[in-house]
Image (cartoon, helix red, strand yellow):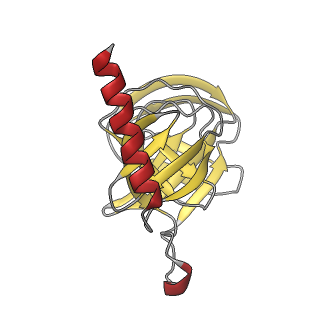
Amino acid sequence: MGLIRVLIYTMLMFVTTVAAAQDCYESSILSPGPFMGNNGEIFKLADGSIWEVKYAYEYLSKYHPSVIVCPSEGKMVVNNKMLDVQMIGGSKPVPKSNCADTPAPEIIESRIQGEFSGWEGKTVFKLINGQIWQQIDGRYIYKYKHNPKVLIYHIDTGYEMQVEGVDGRVRVALLK
């Protein structure tokens, strides 16, 4: 029991110290719902920024939880758990005294039109916003969903798509 108290105290001290730092801020997770807190999970905060969970498997299953994010530390506290995170898109929060107009990377939020059963090498995805994307990697995954939400975001080498409720992401290219 003593070790647990020490860990909780250490985590609370970190949160208190980090939250007081100029770089940290409070927000909430808009999507996905539920947020699990597992490695590779992509999530969107209320400020529009897009993040990825790194090296964690928490299985939190929380809907729109409040969080404290510390971008320079690569940390986020959610449900009294500290996770390693990395920003992958959206606009980076900056102090009001130091605001600059910097364009955000392209992020597309939509839904797959109709039935979704996964991807299998060259799968084509028609979105309700009219865009058509095609898988460009050879991965396979099978999962049935109807009109699932998708988040498509730019990475260094192209685009990746995250389908709500599906573990993993798929590399895609815009056809139309």
Residue at position x 41%, y 35% from top? 168
Which quarter shows the C terminus? Answer: bottom right
Res 39 seen here: no
Q: In this view, does 109 lie above or below 122?
A: below
Q: Is residue 119 left or right of residue 130?
A: left
Q: Is residue 109 left or right of residue 166?
A: right
Res 54 seen here: yes
Residue at position x 71%, y 35% from top? 114
Q: Nearer the viewer, residue 116 or 122?
A: 116
Q: Position of residue 65 (x, y in %)?
A: 61, 39
Q: Is residue 87 above or below residue 62?
A: below
Q: Where is residue 37 in the image (x, y as percent from the top left)?
A: 45, 33
Residue at position x 33%, y 13% from top? 1
Q: Nearer the viewer, residue 26 or 109?
A: 26
Q: In this view, does 123 lie above or below 145?
A: below
Q: Position of residue 85 (x, y in %)?
A: 37, 48
Q: Is residue 3 left or right of residue 19?
A: left
Q: Position of residue 113 (x, y in %)?
A: 69, 41
How many numbered discs, if any? 0
Q: Which of 99 and 163 is in front in this view?
A: 99
